[in-house]
Image: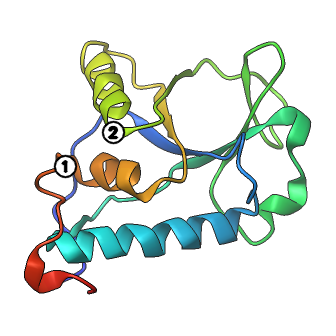
Amino acid sequence: MGMYSAAVDKNYMLWLDLRKEEITFAKQATIMLFMQLRRITDEAGVQLPRNAAIEALLYEEARFDKMDLLDYDRPAYLDTEDGSFVRFNANESLPIRVLFASNKEEFFQAVEKCDNREASNTAIALPPDADVWAAAITGLNESALAPKEANRGA
């Protein structure tokens, strides 16, 4: 079985929300999340979609340290005090709609809001929670992501 399945069709971006996290070093946060995500998908016998990716990082402007992005090649956005989102190194506010989801239920509710809107400038910001990301990246519900007995510990 290969590592990737067919791409998931979506009209939104997935951002990793590091605004309130203790670990904000991008490379460390994403590697930790990926390893946890692979454990979930491997145990469920599910392949990651070909387009599975963290498309950007979201930081709180007041806590942001540019060293957190050392050797990291994805865009980073800053959540400013006035509620706008500024791309790091671009210094301009972006016309982007950001929906926040802290769990799987909120994620699927956010997806419904995206489906009901034509705008492609929508991002869903998710915490570094592998269960939430597994649902977000695969589009599968909890029962489809449940560990299969033969794959436990994979």
- Colour setting: rainbow
Residue toward you, 16 or 101: 101
Q: Is mark 1 on a helix, strand or loop?
A: loop
The image position of residue 13, as x and y in percent, is 44, 39
Q: Going by the image, does 14 lie left or right of 49?
A: right
Q: Name the residue under label 2.
A: 104
Residue 82 against residue 148 in the figure, above or below: above
Q: How crowded is mark 1: few (under 14 residues within 10 Å), some or many (20 or more)?
A: few
Residue 51 against residue 9 in the figure, above or below: below
The image position of residue 98, as x and y in percent, is 54, 24
Q: Which amino acid does label 2 sit on?
A: Lys
Location of residue 77 (image quadrant): top right
Contact, mark 1 vs mark 2 (Cβ under 8 Å): yes
**Identity of the residue drawn at 46% across and 70% down:** 34
Residue 145 in view (yes/no): yes
Residue 131 against residue 117 in the figure, above or below: below
The image position of residue 107, as x and y in percent, is 36, 33
**Identity of the residue drawn at 73% across and 18% down:** 84
**Identity of the residue drawn at 28% across and 86% down:** 153
Q: Going by the image, does 38 lie left or right of 62?
A: left
Q: Which amino acid does label 1 sit on?
A: Glu
**Identity of the residue drawn at 36% across and 24% down:** 110
* Quadrant where the N terminus is found in the figure: bottom left
Q: Going by the image, does 92 lie left or right of 46?
A: right
Q: Is mark 2 on a helix, strand or loop?
A: helix
Q: How crowded is mark 2: few (under 14 residues within 10 Å), some or many (20 or more)?
A: some
Q: Mark 1 points at which residue?
A: 142
Label disc, if present, on residue 55 of the rendered structure: none
